[in-house]
Image: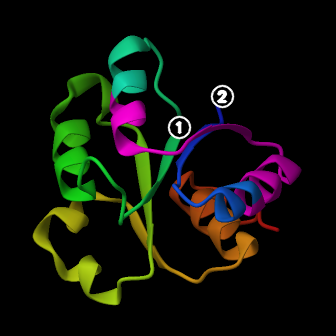
């Protein structure tokens, strides 16, 4: 099984913490700092990652736009999406329901690992 995670997070420190925690649990992690780079990546690949971890408040492209694009792309409909955000009210936006899980920031790396494991159907795999 391809347990690759794409982590799109614009804060370098947060991205590093989450990447280390996910890798420690055996996940292959690819990182990007912006939504536009992630959209370019998705248009160029044949096999999507199993999970996209996406910071809601990203520059360039709104997470709502990105979610709509990803969920309407037939090759990406099986990909799980975990949203992370410090904006509690963002989870109430209609497009946020297109994600499989919503995690409020600040969240520990362990909380993120548990969310990823849960969407993959493996809740026992956690930090």
Residue 19: percent from the left, percent from the top?
Answer: 73, 51
Residue at the far left in the pictured view:
94
* Label 2 with label 1: CB-CB less than 8 Å: yes
Q: Is residue 114 left or right of residue 90?
A: right
The residue singled out by tag 1 in the image is 50
Residue pictured at 24% horizontal, 66% vertical: 96
At 20% from the left and 82% from the top, the residue drawn is 92
Which residue is identified by label 2? Answer: 1
Q: Quadrant of the N terminus?
A: top right
Q: Residues within 10 Å of mark 1 (few under 14, many from 20)?
A: some
Q: Point out the residue furthest to the right here.
A: 24
Q: Which residue is at the far bottom?
A: 88
> Considering only order in the chain, which callout, 1 or 2, is on the residue closer to the N terminus?
2
Quarter of the image with the C terminus in it: bottom right
Q: Quadrant of residue 3?
A: top right
For the record, the magenta segment spans 17-39
């Amino acid at each position: 099984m391809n347990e690759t995670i794409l982590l799109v997070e614009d804060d370098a420190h947060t991205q590093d913490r989450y990447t280390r925690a996910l890798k420690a649990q055996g996940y292959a992690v690819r990182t990007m700092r912006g939504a536009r780079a992630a959209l370019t990546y998705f248009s160029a690949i044949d096999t999507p990652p199993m999970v996209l971890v996406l910071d809601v408040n990203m520059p360039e492209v709104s997470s709502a736009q990105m979610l709509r694009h990803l969920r309407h792309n037939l090759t990406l409909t099986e990909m799980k999406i975990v949203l992370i955000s410090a904006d509690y009210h963002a989870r109430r936006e209609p497009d946020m329901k297109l994600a499989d899980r919503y995690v409020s920031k600040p969240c520990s790396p362990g909380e993120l690992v548990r969310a990823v494991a849960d969407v993959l159907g493996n809740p026992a795999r956690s930090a």
